[in-house]
Amino acid sequence: MAKIRRKRWLRVLGIVVVMAFAARITLWATEPTTTLPLPPKPGTFTLVIKSGGFDRVAQIHIPTGYKADKKFPLVLLLHGGGGGATHTLEKDGWAAKADKEGFLIVAPEGLGALPRLPTNFKINPALWNSGQLKARSPRAMIDDVAFVRELLDELKEKVPYDESRVFSTGHSNGGGMTFRLAADLSERFTAVGMVAGRMVVENPKPRKPLPTLYIIGTKDPLMPLEGGEVKSPWGSWLNPPVVEQLAKWAAAIGCETKPKVVSEKDGLRKVEYPPKTSGPTLTVIYIDGHGHHWPGGKAVLPDSIMGPNTKTLDATDTIWEFFKTVSASHSQTREKK
């Protein structure tokens, strides 16, 4: 009887693994598999580094017009829970934006909730250890801050970039990881921007407070503005109100904790948490009627999970313009010194 149960268990495990590989290929496949060339040239390539005992994978997009003798800005791009690098690069428009504007992108892949098994959207979603995972889960034992640090160090050697213009952006769980990087690895970045990410760092004390842009829809079922119970494909949990999370981050970077309305038109409400002294600003854009989709990107998951998908704002354009504005401001400051 024990042998029969064991055979059944092995059969089920085999099905799970096959499903995982199949879903990886059909939903958010990691492509292309071309290894990063040395010296670098334009295109999208794969880089694998060892970190924490795992082979960690990242896609590097080198823009059209790249020249090795010129250091380009770098954007770290973090996918949402269950997602992958290909989706964020292509369907959210980041690769095309990089080619047009001239910047490098590194889009790493998260590890599964069960990190030793292949990732799969429903069964074993790719995640970031942003701080929202249960403390005893296998995934919470893996240090993604260390991985990003090692990834940035590796890229310095293989695709030299402008270290004074390094930015991070992410969606959902990737947005939450961006908050964590801004708290724990702030010295490596110039500014951050995120869409619908949870700020769950317990007591954020960044060494270098960073200019921050946060974008969220008013009809987001996975990050409801008022907080409360959230139901997802992977279970349910309780979220605090978004304004509480933002006030906590505003305090961490030296801003006032009560926002001021900057503008309100065409379905967009923009507010700012002004700095108390001469530090950075936290800017928030609320998109009226929008759900959890990346604004302006191509939807993959249905509205029944993600909520409405409006076309009011293109988050890729908006975040990059924010990064450029911060970069220009920093350049002017350096010139004055």
Image (cartoon, rainbow, N blue to C red):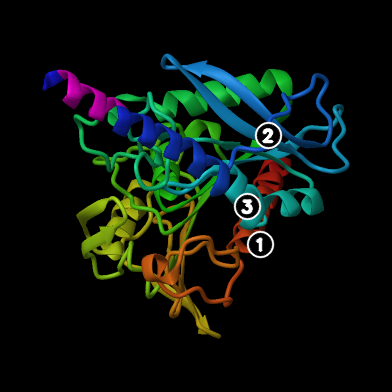
Disc 2 designates what residue? 60
Q: Nearer the viewer, residue 64 or 252?
A: 64
**Earlier residue among tags 1 and 2:** 2
How many C-alpha atoms fall within 10 Å of the one at disc 3: few (<14), some, or many (≥20)?
Answer: many
Which label sits in the foreground, 3 or 1?
A: 1
Give me the disc on residue 80.
none
Find out whether the residues at labels 3 and 2 contact each other: C-beta distance under 8 Å.
no
Can residue 119 be seen by looking at this rendering? no
Is 187 rendered above or below residue 258?
Answer: above
- Read off the magenta span: 3-10
Query: Where residue 326 sits: x, y (%)?
Result: 62, 52
Gap between marks 3 and 2 measured at Cα: 19 Å
Query: Where residue 174 sits: x, y (%)?
Result: 45, 46
Query: Where residue 263 sits: x, y (%)?
Result: 51, 79
**Earlier residue among tags 3 and 2:** 2
Residue 107 as seen in the image, left or right of residue 236 = right
Gap between marks 1 and 2 measured at Cα: 20 Å
What amino acid is at disc 3?
Phe
Q: Nearer the viewer, residue 76 or 247?
A: 76
The residue drawn where x is 81% and y is 26% is 40
Q: Nearer the viewer, residue 76 or 291?
A: 291
**Earlier residue among tags 3 and 1:** 1
What amino acid is at disc 2?
Ile
Q: Quadrant of residue 36?
A: top right
Give me the disc on residue 323.
3
What amino acid is at disc 1?
Asp
Q: Quadrant of residue 120?
A: top left
The residue drawn where x is 57% and y is 77% is 312
Which label sits in the foreground, 3 or 2?
A: 2
Disc 1 designates what residue? 317
Can residue 268 be seen by looking at this rendering? yes
